[in-house]
Amino acid sequence: MHVSISDLSFSYPGTKEYIVSDFSLHMKEGEILSILGESGSGKSTILRLLAGLEEPVKGTVRVGDKVFCDHGNVVLPVEKRGIGMVFQDYALFPHMTVEANITFGLKRWRRRARKERLEEMLALIGMEEYKKRYPFELSGGQQQRIALARALAPNPSLLLLDEPFSNLDAHLQHRIRAELRETIKQTGTTTLFVTHDQEDARVLADRVVMVEKGTVQKAGRPSEVFKDTWNEKLLEV
Amino acid sequence: MKFKHIRPTTTSGWGAAAVFLVAILILPTLFLLVRVFQPASENWDHIREFMLKDYFVDTISIAVWTGLFSVAVGTTLAWLVSAYDFPFRKTLKWALLLPLAIPPYIGAYTYHGILDYTGVVQMTLRNTFGLELSQAYFDIMHIPGAVFIFTIFLYPYVYAITRAFFASQATSLIESARVLGSGPVQTFFRVVLPVSRAAIVAGVSLVVLEVLNDYGVVSYFGIQTFSTAIFQTWFSFGDIDAAIKLAGILMAIVMFILLLEKFLRGRRKFSYSTTKVKPLKPVRLYGWKKAVVVGYTGSVFLLGFVIPVVQLLYWAALTFDYIFTKEFVSYIWNSTFVASVSAAAIVVIAILVANYTRMAKGIVPAVTARLTILGYSIPGAVIAVGVISFFIFLDEQLMTMLGASSSLVLSTSVVMLLFAYVIRFMAIGYNSIESGFEKVGMKFTEASRTLGMGWTETFFKVDVKLIRPAIFSGFILVFVDILKELPLTLILRPFNFETLSTMAYRYANDEMIQEAAVASLFIVMVSGIAMYLFHTFIEKEPN
Ligand SMILES: Nc1ncnc2c1ncn2[C@@H]1O[C@H](COP(=O)(O)OP(=O)(O)OP(=O)(O)O)[C@@H](O)[C@H]1O
Ligand SMILES: [Mg+2]
């Protein structure tokens, strides 16, 4: 769904300094957008603000026809936003099976529909035979896919991914990121993902936003944005 | 429209419930605080002029000496089992915690019995060696005797915390001191003691608070401390106001100790977390050094656990047949009942408050968390006075509301005792639940909320399930502590309501030491088993 973020700002209570300041961004429906930036630049914080896990100081966020927050006032609580989020370490519920994890967000669905959705999701990530397993019985890459399936299952209006590859080894990372783009594009979900790896962004994203100290530094197609930084680096040398 | 729902606030259901519960828990203490400053009675002038100094000197000297000896015993033991390898080390490592399973009042009368004219020591001397020594040599019913009892049964607080600290944090410092050529003794005094100051202070302050809480040992030994004085003023002289004033002074002493603790710990916050770090490689001991270390650690274990338990077993065997009656079973039932009901209440309140304080931000939740654990530093005598006067007040209010026909309803019921337990042991349950939440972190809660679950659903479907081990261990810890508890139970129980601890204490006080053994042994066994289970299942640690 269409996403519009304007002037989003945030600081931790008791501190003056803005972690995110006047962050603005618009996304088209179905777009995959990557936020790129150095460690500590506020990337995770932006995702948490969109998810509703932190309260902004000011700014407005709209997703589709829903207003998430309006001039800093939180209007929709986290659970009413209908977003999907894949956490850096996946946060799969350790006391639930794969099946229970994926259907966790489908509580208001009818039983039949829920079952169908589960199968659909398992097929999407190619893990049909794993539904009775517990998270600790899965490899890192499998856990990541389950986390994705869990986030996608309730048909989120916006999918947020925080460094989805940071817990995987380099080899797995390469294989999975091409796969991930495929999966997300199949569902047509508007997606915002955070990374500090240019290569991730190049392979996965339709568009890239470079963030520094919580504000947009540069935005555009991966090839454009990275060409510039590449040139800058060359000039510096 | 403006509703902020990211975290619970004091106006939300969660916050309101937590703040309300904690407010009820601190009400009796506030009640005392108000009454401390009321005009004094004649008794009070008398107490102040003639007795206060003795109470003060006795209380402080027992507390200070026990503190010093506990540090000496606790830290040396912790250092020896961490840094050296010697026979029985692995067993002693956890066995040296076991003296904590014996409540000091049980230890006190057991040692008194062992050293008595008819006890095993003097009997052996008389019958085998024909020696008849002066009774003065065998009398432990004085302040040094009390210090011995407290030290030998309470040093594990210092031992446990210090050893955990050595295991988790001090390794690299100690190793670098060794590499720099510092000898073992030098390392202990110049590196180990200074860096573990915060841990030692944390342990010793627990010991001192236990000493101030004690009523059983000092009253059995006939020593005048604030605890015994408070009870005496109230029950023998019937002077509530003077008792409240004494309680106020005792509280001031506790406050002073807590401040001192804060000051001595410095800015270093000691965390109980058991981060997995490479453990210290123990140095093997040989020859006379080995003998001395085995002798020292072994003697502490013998004195603190084996000797009293063997003596209790012997007495229990003598008296079991006529002590273990239907009545005795009802004491077991009473103990189990009050302990499990209070432990359950504590765990539920702790979960509520801890869940609120971990998610909400700001001053209110922070203060709520502090107040929740306040009770553990308040001596039993003070809580007893506070709770009784509070309940009598409630009853009076009830009477004026319902007319004079009703009598004392609440203050004669078991509710008063349960309430006091909850205040006193809340901190133990709370700390366990809080560390459970800390271990789990916020990520599962947040994941659940992004999947469309509200606070309450998340709490029941995710949070509670994930902290089940912490809930379980919190319950067991509180249960065992209540089983051992004496002063509150003795004072606040309903008429004719006996538990294992009150029954043991009453027999011992009536010079029927052998008859007290079965009940005591019961308490020691349950505590010992709980400690063993904790050691093997919950605090699994390498080597
Ligand atoms: N609880 C907190 N209190 C105060 N400051 C915080 C807190 N948590 C994070 N910060 C600060 O907020 C800033 C942004 O953090 P954030 O996690 O959003 O960065 P990031 O871009 O995601 O970094 P990384 O790539 O390392 O994950 C950092 O400078 C961090 O120090
Ligand atoms: Mg981050």
Image (tube, rainbow, N blue to C red):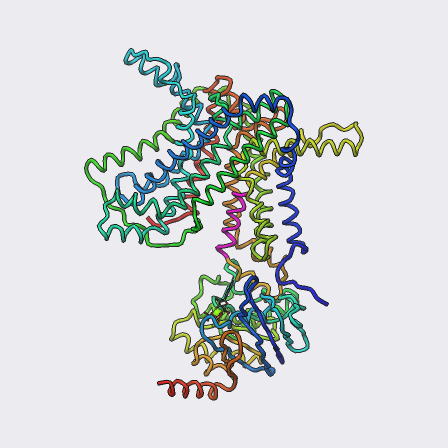
Highlighted range, magenta: B427-440
Marker count (numbered): 0
Does B23 sit left or right of B529 as displayed?
Answer: right
User: Residue B322, position in %: x, y?
Assistant: 50, 19
Compared to A40, does B164 lie above or below? above
Residue visible at 38% across and 54% down in the picture: B276
Kindly give the residue lying farthest to the left in the view shown: B287
User: Residue A65, position in %: x, y?
Assistant: 68, 77
User: Residue B189, position in %: x, y?
Assistant: 30, 43
Q: Confirm whether the magenta stretch covers residue B538.
A: no
Residue in front for this viewpoint, B212 or A159: B212
Residue visible at 62% across and 79% down in the picture: A4
Residue A189 seen: no
Residue B182 seen: yes
User: Residue A119, position in %: x, y?
Assistant: 56, 71
Magenta stretch, main secondary structure, is helix
